Amino acid sequence: MKIAIGCDHGGLHLKQEIKELLSTLGHEVEDFGTHSTESCDYPDYAEKACKKVQDGNAEIAILVCGTGLGMSIAANKMKDIRAVVCGEEFSAYHAKSHNNANVLCLGERVVGVGLAILIVDTFLNASFEGGRHERRVNKIAQLESSLFE
Ligand code: RB5
């Protein structure tokens, strides 16, 4: 799977761990930074990684900041992006199976590396169920379209 990843200074270490996991699993990973612990602005990295998803050049994006919250707020301002913050596996599974989320956000200051890896693994292995959930996701898209009218 093609996966775009990004982080700010608060998510650098966890992003690195996730990048290694994804590469080990055989995924094609594009890393949009940041690459240092120097303070930076998470919306810049959310934008870069999510653009890849919007363009169809990545199936999903994984974004890491201190809490995952700023990344998800920024990502959800972008058309066709359904970003979720997950701190446990149950939500990660349903984010994909029910909400067809295409961006997973994690908080390095919230979850440890071990839990984060389980969350990523769960998200990657879940599939959108469609059916009644498709109707609901379509309604989200309609809400989004109304913003641009
Ligand atoms: C940076 O200090 C921190 O605010 C950021 O990583 C993130 O947690 C924002 O939501």
Image (tube, rainbow, N blue to C red):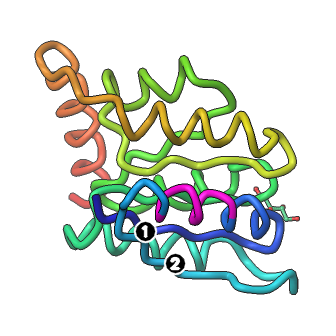
Give the residue pinned by disc 1.
4
Q: Residues within 10 Å of mark 1 (few under 14, many from 20)?
A: many
For the C terminus, give its image quadrant.
bottom left
Is 134 positioned to the left or the right of 109 in the image?
left
Estimate the spatial distance between the alpha carbons at disc 2 and disc 1, rounded to whole Å: 6 Å
Disc 1 on helix, strand or loop? strand
Give the residue pinned by disc 2.
31
In this rendering, is residue 11 above or below 8?
Answer: above
Q: Amino acid at mark 1?
A: Ala
For the N terminus, give its image quadrant.
bottom left
In this rendering, is residue 54 above or below 138?
Answer: below
User: Residue, x 37% and y 40% (percent of image)?
Assistant: 101
Q: Viewer-proximal residue, 116 or 95?
A: 116
In percent of width and height, residue 99 lies at 34, 29
Mark with earlier residue (2, 1): 1
Part of the protein shown in magenta: 17-23
Is 47 positioned to the left or the right of 44 in the image?
left
User: Residue, x 47% and y 53% (percent of image)?
Assistant: 76
